[in-house]
């Protein structure tokens, strides 16, 4: 953080008024104006900032946490504060003035910019700009702006800017999280002998991947030495382009200039690689079809091209042979760019196909597969017209879906009249009764609602549908919406759509051990008795800390005390005792023990960041929640004194009472 003298020099550099300096000093000396909270969708928490020497709050682990990482490791950012101030903004909505209190996400002090900062997702900004264009809008350069907040900042000669999720480079975010322990090490160093050994390997093999570099270490150097040299600037990896977790494809260079030179060389194709006779791009990842089999180019060498099949078996072929086969049409490129819009149709065809349909498709493919070769001249044993029709369907499906086999699946033929014979007004009335009578908190059963529907149809002189059809309409309604209307959001949670996030934003369980860990408590299903006094001590509580990446239990603390900050801190102590370190992120629920000053201070002092999962969303804590059930069923239920029998307490007698 800036000293008083450094702050005064910065104010002189920016020519800030006395009023502006007072505003900044008030923010620097004050606590955040509010404490962030988790709701049904966001994951909040705090980041233990080394730069600021305090815990910085974030309200979203996919947005504001990324902003914190950006500021923490940007040398241009001198200071930043979360939830810095509360001020009123005014703007027009449908011609009427509107105003409300507003809390920006950060106040940022950089060497060339000072002001407030608001972070929002690109989708949210688009939606807000449509509803209130005077509050959020784009300028001519395409950047998002908030004119009401800018007007407030201008009166103090300060700035305000809106940042979008579109600006976040998630590859860089992943790399920063991987290298953070090295970046924060004030005494980071590598011996000269070890450094020279690694530099010699990289100089002799420019562009060597991290995996190959690690494979050559033997006992001369460790992975820590490699990552340390990258942080120290002795080795170069483009952290904005290559994700270092993917060690197979991340190249390492001696410096940035060498990396840039190799990029230019890749853009300039050599004579050998210009085998574009069949418009095939010879590069890693390109898919081709050769002899009816799918291959992927896994490596492009100096003289040969290496191919990998579906079973991960590798073969190599010379450039000359590849070019000859490509010109003859025996090697064909597989173009995937037009398949995305038809993927759903392809899935539907496969899903609707019966076992008999797939058997018929397999039979057809065996018949036409030899005839897919252009030089096939063997006499045809099956009707030529039928075979030509199958081949035509195969090629059409290949162009449309990227897979000709789908064209050989027999089409479903619907017999009879399948049009809806029920009058439109009868169907609309049925849906109205389902929405307004069945899907309510009264939780009426289907039959009673159907009886009301029949009475209404008689009064209106409308033909009513049958009970079976009415039930069909009930079952066709969205399950989540239906259960939420009848029983509430918590009861409907199991029907809610489940989003699997597999991109760089939020790796569900981290990229490595000790990156994301979960901690939670459970009351064990067993009653314990003192061995000396024979007194019933009751059920114990267990606190688990589980690594999300490996699913390994890092620490357990068992006590008769209900969940408290003491149980949390003892579990952390046990983790350090066993593994000599704490996790990078600790995921907790909304329990009061996780809000303790002692607990949060301990995490902050040890640079451990806290994430608070949304309330009433057990899927966010699946790692721990699933373990609780396993611990009971696989271990506790095999011990004397387990309380399984107490589920039917009226049947329990003295001799079997746990």
Image (cartoon, grey):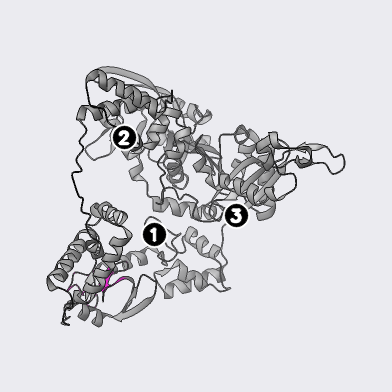
Q: Is residue 54 visible?
A: yes
**Which mark sits nearer the N-terminus, 3 or 2?**
2
**Distance of label 2 from label 1 (alpha carbons):** 51 Å
Q: Residues within 10 Å of mark 1 (few under 14, many from 20)?
A: some
Give left or right: position of 173 versus 546.
left
**Distance of label 3 from label 2 (alpha carbons):** 47 Å
Residue 656: % across, % down:
76, 42
Residue where numbered disc 3 is placed: 552
Quadrant of the image containing the C terminus: top right
Q: Which residues are magenta?
A: 270-295
Q: Say the numbered circle drawn on residue 473.
A: 2
**Distance of label 1 from label 3 (alpha carbons):** 29 Å
Query: Do labels 2 and 1 touch, CB within 8 Å?
Result: no
Residue where numbered disc 1 is placed: 242
Q: Nearer the viewer, mark 2 or mark 1?
A: 2
Instruction: Report if residue 1 lies within the magenta region.
Output: no
Residue 96: % across, % down:
26, 17
Give left or right: position of 445 versus 421.
right
């Amino acid at each position: 953080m800036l000293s008083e003298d450094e702050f005064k020099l910065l104010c002189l550099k920016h020519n800030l008024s006395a009023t502006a300096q007072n505003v900044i000093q008030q923010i620097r000396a004050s606590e955040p104006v509010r404490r962030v909270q988790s709701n049904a969708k966001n994951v909040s928490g705090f980041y233990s900032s080394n730069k600021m020497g305090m815990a910085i709050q974030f309200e979203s682990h996919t947005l504001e946490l990324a902003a914190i990482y950006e500021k923490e490791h940007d040398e241009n950012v001198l200071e930043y504060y979360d939830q810095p101030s509360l001020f009123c903004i005014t703007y027009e909505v449908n011609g009427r003035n509107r105003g409300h209190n507003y809390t920006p996400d950060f106040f940022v002090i950089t060497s060339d910019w000072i002001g407030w900062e608001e972070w929002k997702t690109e989708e949210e900004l688009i939606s807000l700009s449509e509803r209130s264009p005077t509050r959020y809008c784009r300028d001519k350069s395409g950047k998002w702006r908030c004119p009401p907040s800018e007007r407030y900042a201008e009166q103090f000669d300060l700035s305000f800017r809106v940042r979008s999720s579109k600006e976040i480079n998630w590859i860089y975010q992943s790399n920063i999280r991987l290298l953070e322990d090295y970046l924060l090490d004030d005494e980071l160093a590598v011996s000269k002998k070890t450094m020279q050994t690694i530099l010699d390997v990289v100089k002799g093999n420019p562009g060597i991947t991290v995996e190959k570099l690690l494979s050559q270490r033997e006992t001369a150097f460790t992975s820590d030495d490699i990552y340390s040299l990258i942080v120290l600037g002795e080795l170069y990896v483009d952290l904005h382009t290559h994700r270092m977790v993917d060690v197979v494809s991340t190249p390492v260079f001696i410096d940035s200039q060498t990396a840039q030179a190799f990029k230019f060389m890749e853009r300039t194709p050599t004579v050998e690689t210009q085998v574009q006779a069949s418009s095939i791009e010879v590069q890693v990842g390109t898919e081709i079809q050769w002899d009816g089999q799918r291959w992927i180019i896994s490596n492009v060498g100096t003289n040969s091209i290496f191919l990998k099949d579906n079973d991960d078996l590798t073969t190599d072929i010379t450039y000359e042979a590849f070019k000859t086969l490509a010109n003859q049409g025996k090697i064909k490129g597989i173009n995937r760019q037009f398949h995305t819009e038809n993927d759903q149709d392809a899935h539907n065809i496969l899903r609707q196909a019966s076992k008999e349909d797939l058997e018929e498709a397999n039979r057809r493919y065996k018949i036409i597969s030899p005839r897919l070769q252009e030089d096939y001249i063997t006499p045809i044993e099956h009707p030529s017209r039928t075979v030509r029709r199958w081949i035509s369907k195969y090629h059409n499906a290949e162009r449309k879906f990227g897979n000709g086999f789908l064209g050989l699946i027999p089409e479903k033929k619907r017999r009879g009249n399948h049009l809806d014979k029920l009058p439109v007004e009868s169907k609309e009335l049925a849906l109205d009764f389902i929405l307004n009578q069945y899907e309510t908190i009264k939780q009426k059963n289907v039959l009673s609602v159907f009886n009301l529907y029949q009475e209404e149809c008689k009064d209106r002189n409308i033909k009513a549908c049958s009970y079976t059809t009415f039930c069909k309409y009930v079952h066709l309604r969205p399950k989540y919406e239906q259960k939420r209307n009848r029983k509430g959001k918590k009861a409907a949670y199991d029907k809610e759509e489940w989003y699997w996030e597999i991109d760089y934003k939020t790796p569900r369980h981290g990229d490595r051990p000790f990156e994301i860990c979960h901690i939670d408590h459970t009351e064990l299903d067993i009653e314990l008795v003192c061995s000396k006094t024979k007194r019933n001590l009751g059920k114990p509580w267990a606190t688990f800390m589980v690594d999300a990446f490996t699913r390994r239990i890092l620490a357990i603390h068992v006590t008769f005390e209900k969940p408290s900050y003491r149980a949390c801190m003892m579990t952390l102590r046990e983790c350090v005792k066993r593994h000599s370190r704490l996790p990078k992120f600790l995921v907790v629920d909304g329990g009061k023990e996780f809000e303790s000053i002692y607990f949060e201070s301990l995490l902050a002092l040890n640079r451990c960041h806290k994430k608070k999962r949304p309330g009433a969303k057990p899927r966010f804590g699946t790692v721990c929640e699933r373990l609780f059930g396993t611990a009971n069923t696989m271990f506790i239920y095999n011990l004397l004194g387990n309380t399984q029998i107490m589920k039917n307490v009226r049947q329990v007698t003295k001799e079997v009472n746990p």
